[in-house]
Amino acid sequence: MKHLLKMLDLSKEEILEILNLADQLKYELKHGIEHKHLSGKTLGMIFQKPSTRTRVSFETGIYQLGGYGMFLSANGLQIGRGEPIRDTARVLSRYVDGVMIRTFDQEEVETFAKYSSVPVINGLTDFSHPCQVLADLMTVREHKGTLEGLKMCYIGDGNNMANSLTVGCLKVGMNVSLACPEGYYPDPVVLEFAAGYGDKFKLTNDCFEAVKDADVVFTDVWASMGQESEAQQRKLAFEGYQVNSELLSHARPDCMVQHCLPAHRGEEITDEVFEAHADEIFDEAENRLHAQKAVMVILMK
Ligand code: CP
Ligand code: NVA
């Protein structure tokens, strides 16, 4: 593994290696065991979109590993004035030991990685959010003890989270059911990948069909970053695609609820469901730190 660009690039073994190391690093942190695997190394962090979790967990994570995280707002870089990505990649490669990028187009991250001589980590694009899904899988495994054979249900927009969850969950042996409104399906590349899993994958417009006997239910915002101007139109399109207690009563009684955050209560999830599952959701947020530390150690050590 040279970079972390999207879940499609990872094998099941690579995913499990990350999760196992993440569990170990979490244990070491909680027990005060030193784990400065990246002593003296620098991570450049380019942000083209806002962030709370990704920024703080990467910056804290690299610090805990003995390294240094450098926040780089894309608007403050020459990228913002049109310097090509392939030049920026070659320049930063001469200074830092790894680069994390959050941007719009997946192609930008792929191009950056192509020209970079240091590892590149995707911190979210419109197509994928692999760091989040690694933390999600870690959290589900922590709570359920296993991943293989569990049923993951995703309700809502076929966005970056739906794309990455579908691929990640199928790769580790989970069953995947998505309920998305027509016109808001996951990326065709993901649907083609999922089709190879036969009846382990289902895409429907019916939330109740998707949620039946689910072990874990995920949802995400109806309007992702960059889609703010479509918010009203999307509210109409996603009416009924809400994770609420009625819907959850059709899942397994011990069903977990996960949300990558930030959440819009009253839209994709009710306040009642969110608060009833808050511990699991904030474990998920915490696990961003541990999962990303594992990714950095594997890529940058
Ligand atoms: N879940 C997530 O990536 O959060 P941020 O946008 O706050 O980084
Ligand atoms: N789908 C959301 C995820 C935020 C972490 C977005 O892209 O804005």
Image (tube, rainbow, N blue to C red):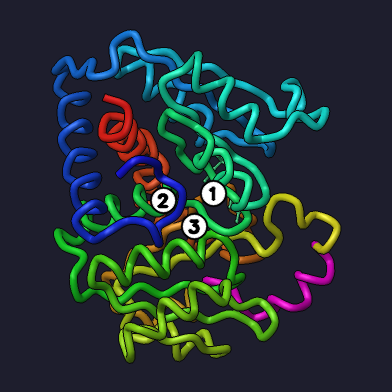
Comes first in the chain, label 1 or label 3: 1
- Residue 132, given in percent of the width and then of the height, sits at 44, 49
Left or right: 12 in relation to 167: left
The crowding category of the residue bearing disc 1, from other C-alpha atoms within 10 Å (few below 14, some 14 to 19, many at least 20), is: some
Q: Toward which corner of the image does residue 141 lie, by quadrant?
A: bottom left
Residue range highlighted in magenta:
231-244
Q: For the residue with label 1, is its CB less than 8 Å from the closest atom of ligand 1?
A: yes
Residue at 37%, 24% in the rendered image: 61
Q: Are marks 2 and 1 in contact (CB under 8 Å)?
A: yes
When the figure is inspected, residue 141 is found, relative to residue 175, above or below; the finding is above
Q: Is residue 97 magenta?
A: no
Between 66 and 290, the one lying in front of the other is: 66
Judged from the image, the quadrant occupied by ligand 1 is: top right
* Real-space CA distance between mark 2 and mark 3, rounded to the nearest whole angstrom: 8 Å
The crowding category of the residue bearing disc 3, from other C-alpha atoms within 10 Å (few below 14, some 14 to 19, many at least 20), is: many
The crowding category of the residue bearing disc 2, from other C-alpha atoms within 10 Å (few below 14, some 14 to 19, many at least 20), is: many
Give the position of the N terminus as an image quadrant.
Answer: top left
* Real-space CA distance between mark 1 and mark 3, rounded to the nearest whole angstrom: 11 Å
Which circle marks residue 219 in the picture?
A: none
Would you name the residue on which mark 3 appears? 274
Mark 2 or 3, closer to the camera: 2
Q: Secondary structure at mark 1?
A: loop
Comes first in the chain, label 2 or label 1: 1
Residue at 23%, 72% in the rendered image: 173
Q: Are marks 2 and 3 in contact (CB under 8 Å)?
A: yes
Under mark 1, the amino acid is Leu
- Residue 153, given in percent of the width and then of the height, sits at 41, 75
Which circle marks residue 261 in the picture?
A: 1
Between 130 and 261, the one lying in front of the other is: 130
Q: Is residue 237 magenta?
A: yes
